[in-house]
Image: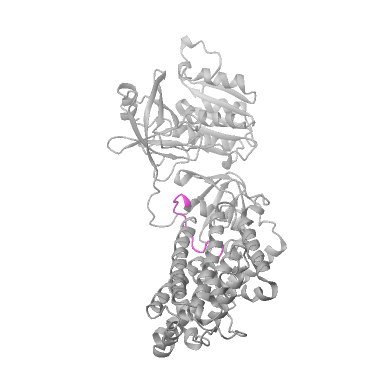
Amino acid sequence: MIDKGNLQLKPLTTTGQKIFLALENLFNRSFGEALNPFYFLGAIANFLFWIIVFSGLYLYIFFETSVVHAYASVQALSQTQPYVGGLLRSLHRYASDALVLVIALHMTRHVVFNRYQGLRWFSWVSGILILWLTYASGINGYMLAWDRLSQFLVTTTAQWFDALPILGGAMARNFISNAQVSDRMFSLLSFIHIGLPLCLMTLLWVHTQRIPSARTIPPRGLMYGLLLSLSVLSVIKPAFSQSQADMGIVVETVAFDWFYLPIYALIEPWGPITVWLLLLGSTALLVAMPWIYLGTSKHLKSARMAVPQDDRLISLYAGETLLDAGLRVGLPMPFECRNGGCGLCKCTVTHGEVSLLPYQAWALSTQERASGITLMCCAQALGDLEISYLPQEGTAPLAIHRYTARVTSLAALSTHVMLVGLQMDSGSRLVFQAGQYINIILSDGAKRSFSFANACTDSGYIELHVARVRGGRFSSWVFDRMVVGELIEFEGPVGSFTLRENSDKPIIFVAGATGFAPVKSILEHAFETGIQRPMVLYWGVRSQQDLYLLKQVEHWLAMHKHFSFIPVLSAPLAQDNWTGRTGALLEAILADYPDLSAYQVYACGSVRMAQSAQTSFEKHGLMASECFSDAFHLAPQATLHDPSRSLAMGEAPHG
């Protein structure tokens, strides 16, 4: 792994990062990273919302929705039941203020740490809507108390909205005198104060669904501490109403809530239209931010992440961290803070490059970085990469999608290799990477694995090469009983034996027997996408008849000058009249390439061949990170000696 270091961000953003890291460091030293509120801002916001909801439900039981009784009913909460109604009223107020503060901190942190682009754009935009709904709910709540602050808010809001041409002064006429204020208005305000939080609750749920494994509840210690702090504040400084509203008196001074009402301080000096332009302009700027700066940093591009231990190849979205990508597909990756503070989400990058977002120094040492270890929550791919990690203990095996396809063609490629063509059912689509494989599910639940022998297409066509295995259940069925039109159930795609496209090194493909199938898939993908790297295919078989798609390879030779082909026969027949290379496949490769330090190798064949290739090639200078083998990189649940795994070529002992 080559670590490109932290991103070169603008001075203002860099300053913000330093401030947040310093604050997080202070809280880590005081409470530990497991209870650091800066690592759970989103979860704290959710918790505060529920405090507001449950305290608000109690307050609403005693609230009178009428001009005459609204003020008195709110006052009675503090006067007649101070240790229940009064406490909950104050808790409702301070939790609401805290919610605005936490949302602001949450969004600011995402901005300064560049966590609002790419796949996170939806969470960012929905977060802006959550912020404005929170403001609207809070301002509406202040109106219900019907004190001097309520009077100021309803009259100022009416003037502010009347500045819009569509209203033409209609709202302000409702507040000229006390006679114009009716019970109907309080019913409307109450309805809005119920409807807005319901919308907010729904949006919070949608907001968190986009982030994989998002935490919606903070740790218990934080919950108890936060609830206790708000309760103590409510006792020390209880919330009270100001004087009762009176439309016959002009409100000159009010006790202001700067958490919710800062925009109201600008309406009179700046004018309603200016404030509208400020509000709409700032909202438009916030919404556009993920796209205004997208692409200015070199790490913001799509890539793929191979995870051999889980047999997965994951498409990474622009700006997505390795942790988010793994959690998105259900990998049992360890994590806690998700902000580079706890050091639990470490992995080793065995191939490729990443860029690290800022993190706490103790979470990842210089020695660890130098050895290829990184923090998945802060690492973003600079191209295709491969990682390994220590999974969480006690996690269930990763589920794989199941599909059904219909057999559309059966063609004998040789006496012992059958081409099986499958077509996905209409309405279902399988997206796979060239070189991956599927697990065919037999009637008793047993599985046989076969690589895709073609590149992925929109048509939903799948090509498999099935080798006849003596006594093999699936291969015997294919050769003796399978007919066109049958339905096949399978799961996938799985596997990480795919082309690393972010390298410009020449490629040596090593195919043993029907190991040609995944190599064919990769080559077709490379040709279709215009990859011009020098590529040579060594195909090792027993006799000439085993080169079952020789004409296809000869066609590639004619069409692509950067491609070459060396067939190697280990036991040619007399009638073959073979004049080409013979003997052991690996010996032929090493004779042609005694120094492999400048190459990438993709080997697919029997397990013995793949293991021998890895060892032999490394002795001749090939970097371990540049040797890829499907048989060598199997998931833990499908070990090298697992007979249910047909080595992606249909060569399992039981077929």
- Examine the structure image and report whether residue 330 is included in the region drawn in magenta: yes
Total count of labels: 0
Establish if 404 lies above or below 75: above
Q: Is residue 113 visible?
A: no
Residue placed farthest to the bottom in the image? Answer: 79
Q: Residue at x 39, y 90 (%)?
A: 80
Examine the residues drawn in magenta and state their main secondary structure.
loop
Residue 177 percent across, percent down from the top left: 54, 81
Residue placed farthest to the left in the image? Answer: 444
Establish if 496 lies above or below 88: above
Establish if 10 lies above or below 317: below
Residue 493 percent across, percent down from the top left: 44, 39
Give left or right: position of 55 versus 434.
left
Instruction: Report the magenta residues as a range.
Output: 328-341
Residue 521 percent across, percent down from the top left: 51, 30
Establish if 383 lies above or below 11: above
Q: Residue at x 31, y 34 (%)?
A: 442
Q: Depth check: give the residue in front, 500 or 304.
A: 304
Q: Depth check: give the residue in front, 480 or 107.
A: 107
Give left or right: position of 179 versus 396.
right
Q: Depth check: give the residue in front, 217 or 184.
A: 184
Q: Depth check: give the residue in front, 125 or 451.
A: 125
Q: Is residue 316 visible?
A: yes
Where is residue 581, by image quadrant? Answer: top right
Where is residue 535, by image quadrant? Answer: top right
Residue 344 percent across, percent down from the top left: 50, 61
- Examine the structure image and report whether residue 72 is included in the region drawn in magenta: no
Quarter of the figure that contains the C terminus? top left
